[in-house]
């Protein structure tokens, strides 16, 4: 029998986790969260109007590919430093089992007045409700673990709750998951089955994406020259986690990245 890849293992775990969470915190209670009174921020609008690359700065303690990255820094300090430094959006990993995050991290990050992505493995509407109740502005759907029908249903539910959806794809075959309720399309440079990172793969796929939605380059970005190359190719947003988080002071790492990127781009 073939061993399950990491994505399959995560999804198996999520199916049980959702059942447990629904029993502990019924949807009716989630709907009473004061977060439902706020109007979510739009990352799509932000990226379509801004001229510079939009950095989606991630708070990520550990990952299946890298193990512990940084479990010593407080979410509040890091996310406010990212925000003050000019991030376009925050990405908060809320998965506990594989990434060491939680929904409380997102609730704390909500003190910042910029869009926040709930970064998790969403397979059920209930998780979108959790995201809204915790203060997220957008959710991630990963094409590799959802059928086209489920992407349509989940993105429609997110829209109904006022949230945007970032659809993550990695292969050409997954392009059929892009539907009208998808607001942003991300191309993951990392193959989640092998962990291999290939930036050129993303540039090739970009040409096939719909032009009316901002494209986001995700994973393995650790060089301003690469960000600049991807921006020139047409990517508007850049999801960066490990490169910032592996530093003792992720906010300072973010600031020097932005300074170097601006310096590089001002040379033209
Ligand atoms: O990062 C992993 O090892 C991983 C494994 C399995 C599924 C998802 C995984 N990562 C989630 C992400 O997509 C990244 O956190 C995000 O794109 C940022 O990537 P990076 O800048 O390389 O931390």
Image (tube, rainbow, N blue to C red):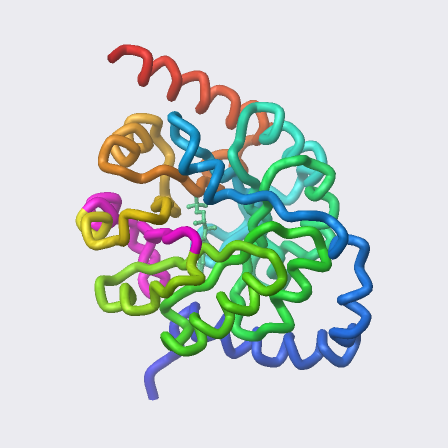
Which is more toward the observer, 154 or 124?
154
Q: Is residue 64 above or below residue 76?
A: below
Q: In this rendering, does residue 248 appear at all? A: no
- Residue drawn at point x = 64 percent, y = 52 percent: 136
Which quadrant would the N terminus be assigned to in this image?
A: bottom left
Q: Position of residue 222 (x, y in %)?
A: 37, 34
Query: Could you tell me residue 147's position as x and y percent?
Result: 38, 77
The reply, left or right, for residue 214 in relation to residue 87 is left
Which residue lies most toward the bottom here? 1
Q: Is residue 191 magenta?
A: yes
Residue 159 drawn above or below residue 47: below
Residue 100 vs 80, above or below: the answer is below
Q: Residue at x 51, y 68 (%)?
A: 156
Looking at the rendering, in which quadrant would you find the C terminus?
Answer: top left
Which residue range is magenta in the image?
183-203
Which of these two is toward me, 222 or 178?
178
Locate residue 6, reporting x and y percent. 43, 68
Identify the residue at image location x=31%, y=50%.
Answer: 189
Q: Is residue 15 shown in magenta?
A: no
Q: Residue at x 20, y 54 (%)?
A: 208
Q: Where on the picture, by quarter, is residue 159?
A: bottom right
Query: Is residue 191 visible in the rendered structure shown here?
Result: yes
């Amino acid at each position: 029998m073939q061993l399950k890849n990491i994505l399959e293992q995560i999804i198996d775990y999520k199916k049980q986790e959702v059942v447990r969470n629904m029993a502990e915190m019924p949807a009716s209670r989630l709907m009473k969260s004061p977060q439902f009174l706020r109007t979510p921020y739009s990352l799509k609008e932000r990226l379509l109007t801004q001229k510079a690359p939009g950095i989606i700065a991630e708070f990520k303690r550990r990952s299946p590919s890298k193990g512990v990255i940084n479990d010593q820094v407080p979410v509040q300090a890091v996310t406010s430093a990212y925000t003050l430094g000019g991030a376009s959006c925050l990405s908060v990993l809320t998965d506990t089992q594989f990434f060491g995050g939680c929904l409380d991290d997102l609730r704390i990050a909500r003190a910042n007045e910029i869009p926040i992505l709930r970064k998790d493995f969403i397979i059920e509407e209930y998780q979108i409700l959790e995201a809204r109740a915790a203060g997220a502005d957008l959710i991630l759907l990963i094409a590799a673990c959802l059928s086209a029908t489920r992407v349509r249903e989940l993105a429609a539910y997110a829209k109904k709750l006022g949230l945007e959806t970032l659809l993550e794809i990695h292969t050409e075959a997954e392009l059929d998951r892009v539907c009208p309720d998808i607001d942003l399309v991300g191309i993951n440079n990392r193959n989640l089955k092998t962990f291999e990172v290939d930036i050129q793969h993303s540039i090739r796929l970009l040409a096939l994406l719909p032009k009316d939605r901002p494209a986001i380059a995700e994973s393995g970005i650790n060089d301003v020259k690469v960000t600049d190359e991807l921006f020139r190719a047409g990517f508007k947003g850049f999801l960066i986690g490990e490169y910032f988080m592996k530093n003792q002071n992720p906010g300072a790492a973010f600031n020097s990245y932005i300074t170097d990127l601006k310096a590089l781009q001002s040379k033209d």
